[in-house]
Amino acid sequence: MTSETYKRFLESQAEKNPVKLDRKTLSWEEQDVRLPPGSSSNLLESVYLGREPEETVVVDRKSAKLLQERLTGLEIEVNRLHRRIRGMKILIWVLLGITVLLGLFIFFRLQGAPFAIS
Amino acid sequence: MPSPRVKMKDLEKEIKSRFIGNEEAIRMALLNQLHRRSATLIRAPRGIGKSTLMLLVLKGLCGDDMVVISGASEVKRGEVVGRLHIPSLEREGVERVLWASFTKARGKGLDEVNRLNPYTTANVHHMMQFGEVWAYGQKTPVGDYTLLANENPGDPSTFIHSPPFYDRFDVSVPLNSLTLGEKFRLQELLDRYEDSLVESMPQVLSFEELEEARKEVLEIKLNPDLVGYVNLIVRDFQVCVRDREESEVKPPTLCEGCHFIRDVCSMIKEPPSERATVILSHLAKAAVWLNGGCTLDDLLRMALWVFSHRIKLVRVRSLLGDLQELLNRERAKLEDRNARRQWTVLNELSKDFNPSLYRLAREAAVEDVVFAEELMKLEEGWIGGGQLKREETLSAQMDWRLTSAWRTHSK
């Protein structure tokens, strides 16, 4: 049997440290939380881990540089993929042309047309 | 007429005007007087003022109604407890016991308690435990009293008393040597009182007023947060997933490969007894009565005096310094629990099982033994209610078993 004082202790702690409880998630607002100088808020977590960012985001030089490098990397990747897509498009058109020609050849051959290649 | 509370504050001022330095020790020694049958142990090297402080407190509270027994002299049981009345035995054939004045006096002092022989110590131990004394098959109650003892832990000519005997002392108050400035003040003080610091000490409050104060303190109800913190502090210093109290192997060997090797528990060889909880509660009530409140910082400061003679650490460089470091870690842990909303989560889970909350609680539990204990108790209920399978529980996955104490089974 649980002690009444223990229950009251838990209730009192719950009142002092409230949480928002949805069906699947639990959240709370941090009060009087001051970031140490030179540190970032949870922007990187939101970028890399998909977490919800805070209302106001603070970014330090190191994190900004990290994000800059990440963006540059992504731009290079995008350009590379663009070039590949262009090449693939040309390849698709060529293959499509060959398929059409091959289809026409088979069609006329079946119709008995003097369509000889010799 | 001033109230007992005002008189207690006057007593503190009076003692501080006669005893230089060690203000925290004086405050703690007086705070410990505010519950029935209080027992205070003063520890210091020789010549620091252990006996002086003991006598000042006893005189201030009991006046002449005090008896001091010196362990350094050859004290026999008859002088501490009682002796047989020979004429009654010879003339009437009846065994009558003449109870010693030590048992009757309200103020009891034990000077150099470490030198007290084991037989006398056993009698004092019995008195502190049951509030009565035994001799020649007869017993007599000793009623309410205040007991102060002192010892020099570095004294070579000493008996090694058992830990349960020391456990009967509510607090252990260490004294430090005086700084240069304090030495000057002491010399001035000795000149002013013409070397009769103790003899001239007045009785500031009567023992009846002290009893009234003790009654008022007893009636104080601590708020649930304070009660919770008292219990948490003691439990954090007691808990061990490998059942240290029962195990024949003690830390640090016992801790090899343990999940909590970096925790406070791994630094403690012998944990404090449950009496530490009782004493901390008494002191918290006394602080509320005397000062109007008691904070978490006050509790942690009191814990230093309550634990220092009840605990054995794995490695000791300076007992108080090492213990203070552990208490600082304890404070950080208490704050961390609040930041993680652990008790809020446990409160919600104690009302109803919620899988998301349970996952969060489990994450916290693998880093917090005391929290894990409470969660595992709830798990038992959920298994019974079909809300959780045994193989999904924290106890199953961490291989922890909770019975009367922690038990681990190696796979």
Image (cartoon, grey):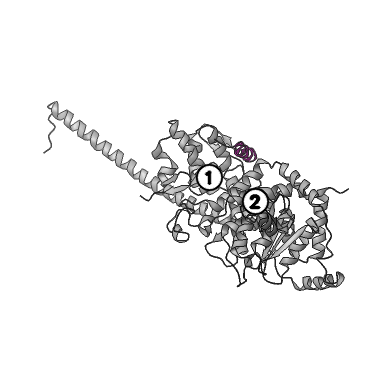
Residue at horizontal 83%, vertical 71%?
A: B195
Work out whether B284 lies above or below B178: above
User: Which is in the foreground here, disc 1 or disc 2?
Assistant: 2
Query: Mark 1 to mark 2: distance in Å?
Result: 46 Å
Q: Tag 1: Cα neighbours inside 10 Å, few (<14), some, or many (≥20)? A: many
In-front residue for pair A116/B61: B61
In-front residue for pair B219/B355: B219
For the magenta stretch, what is the residue range?
A: A3-16
Q: Mark 2 points at which residue?
A: B139
Q: Disc 1 residue type? A: Phe
Chain of the residue under label 1? B
Q: Magenta stretch: residue B276 in it?
A: no
Tell which circle, 1 or 2, labels the residue nearer the N-terminal end: 2
Residue B281 pos. (x, y %): 66, 47
Q: Do labels 1 and 2 share a chain?
A: yes
Say the numbered circle drawn on residue B371.
1
Residue B257 pos. (x, y %): 42, 57
Q: Residue furthest right?
A: B1
Q: Disc 2 residue type? A: Lys
Q: Is mark 2 on a helix, strand or loop?
A: strand
Residue at horizontal 60%, vertical 66%?
A: B318
Q: What element carries label 1?
A: helix
Asked if labels 2 and 1 touch by Cβ distance under 8 angstroms, the answer is no
Query: Horizontal placement of B396 versus B340: left or right?
Result: left
Q: Tag 2: Cα neighbours inside 10 Å, few (<14), some, or many (≥20)? A: some
Residue at horizontal 60%, vertical 62%?
A: B119
